[in-house]
Amino acid sequence: MPRPRDTSAEIWSRQLDVYRAMGPDGRLRRAVQLSEDVKNLARDGIRHAHPDWPESRVETELVRRLFGPAASHADSA
């Protein structure tokens, strides 16, 4: 995994040590949490852009953004 350009070599080395210490289960839990965090941020952005939308429409838009337009219409097929 390449070092991010905005991260020093020392900090990147420490971060990798933390990931290694987590073990596979800990890294998986962290990845799932980060994924949930990103989806929540996306929902918040959709709600901010469309405050009048019901929650069902927000979720449909989230699915569209994550998986493309075909996925957001799967129920209507």
Image (spheres, helix red, strand yellow):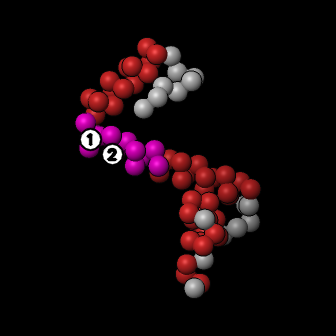
Q: In front: 36, or 71?
A: 71
Residue shown at the point (50%, 16%) measured from the top left? 8
Q: Does the magenta stretch include residue 33?
A: yes
Looking at the rendering, in which quadrant would you find the N terminus?
A: top left
Does the residue at mark 1 contact the one at mark 2 (Cβ under 8 Å)?
yes
Q: In front: 52, or 65?
A: 65
Q: Where does the magenta region start and end?
A: 23-35
Residue shown at the point (46%, 44%) measured from the top left? 34
Q: In front: 56, or 62?
A: 62
In this rendering, the answer to whether 44 lies above or below 4 is below
Left/right placement of residue 52 relative to residue 16 reads right
Left/right placement of residue 33 relative to residue 43 reads left
Q: In front: 61, or 44?
A: 61
Residue shown at the point (44%, 21%) measured from the top left? 12
Left/right placement of residue 59 relative to residue 23 reads right
Magenta stretch, main secondary structure, is helix
Q: Mark yes or no: residue 24 visible.
A: yes
- Which structural element holds mark 2? helix
Reading the image, the residue beneath label 2 is: 28
Reading the image, the residue beneath label 1 is: 24
Residue shown at the point (57%, 85%) measured from the top left? 77
- The three-letter code of the residue at mark 1 reads Pro
In which image quadrant can residue 49 be found?
Answer: bottom right
